[in-house]
Image (cartoon, helix red, strand yellow):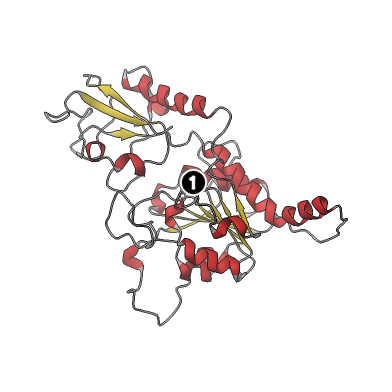
Amino acid sequence: MGEILAAPCASSSSSPSSSSRGDGSSHATSERDGRVAWLHSGSAGVEHILAVPRVRDAVAPLTNARGAFSASLGEWALFASLWFAKKVHAMRASQAKGEWMRDTVGMLQGKTMSIVGYGDIGRACAVRAKAFGMKVVALRRDPSKARSTSNWSPYDRGGVVNASLARFPTHRDRPAADDTSSVRSDPIQAEGDFVVLALPHTPETEARSIHWSPYDRGGVGLIDASMIASMKPTGVLVNVGRGAVVDEDALVDALTREKIKGAALDVTATEPLPAGHAFYALENCLMSFHCADLTEDYHELTMTTFIRHARAYVGEEEGDDAAWNVVSKEKGY
């Protein structure tokens, strides 16, 4: 559900502030789009919506359904981790052949989950990983926004976990393209037994090989060949964010050559994935075809988020219930 719902201008002081104005006004209007005070996306990802110039340039703020599907995505990240740890593919293959098998299996307890992108989805993954006894390390653009790790409770909606936080790297942190003197080693993925990507698609996270981006600013991509190469040989890459953040050619190469244990992909750069793509044939690649958040109550979940915003818009909600999922049009999420 990626449609945009637009609200007419109102004098309500509950209207979300526009992220593009920065003037502290309580509602956004202009002569250009004066009939619209607020835009809402029924999806969490907004790169396809910001590709529309009229939306991207609108003074009216944009909100999204952030948080509506995080629980399901967190569950899928743990399911994917268990799939590889418990060797489900090998067991299913033996069952299909009618052959008994005996083999050791791994455990999640004591393993490390490295989460790249510690927003709402990342925290949902972290809470569930901690419940399995895993160590969690996390990376986000602004560590100061992370909630306190004290008094952690598995029931805390904020996903407060004992996670180590580091600053999110950007293209400014990267060596020049022609600098091949060394392979970059980022501790977070080098440490992770399971590296979970919960990133939005923005100019700074987009892979070099992707040319259809609505931003067209030469994004260098975050999950490139050197980052994949610095993972453990036993590591598994789990992507529940956006496919465009990964250099898929580099990932196919690493999986084919078994440089990493495997990859679990809910998303790919191109969807639907073209017939004959290498991911389909790789036995160490688990795919869910962007269905990890497609729950049976998908529409109810996203509508609940919209209704909460709508009530806040007309002044019926106060305090935490009136919190807005305001999208930064500049950052892309």
Local secondary structure at mark 1: loop
* Residue 1, quarter of picture: top left
Which residue is located at x 29 percent, y 60 percent? 218
Indicate the amino acid at tag 1: Pro
Q: Which residue appears farthest toward the front when viewing the image?
A: 275
Q: Nearer the viewer, residue 328 or 296?
A: 296
In the image: residue 84, left or right of residue 152? right
Q: Which residue appears farthest toward the right when viewing the image?
A: 100
Q: Position of residue 9 (x, y in %)?
A: 22, 21
Does residue 130 appear in the picture of this structure? no
Neighbor class of circle 1 (other Cα within 10 Å; few <14, some 14-19, many 20+) is: few
* Residue 319, quarter of picture: top left
In the image: residue 185, left or right of residue 108? left
From what the image shows, is residue 33 above or below residue 253? above
- What is the total number of numbered labels drawn onto the structure image? 1
Does residue 323 appear in the picture of this structure? yes
From what the image shows, is residue 238 above or below residue 323? below
From what the image shows, is residue 244 above or below residue 177? above
Instruction: Residue under label 1, please give it.
Output: 272
Q: Position of residue 88 (x, y in %)?
A: 74, 52
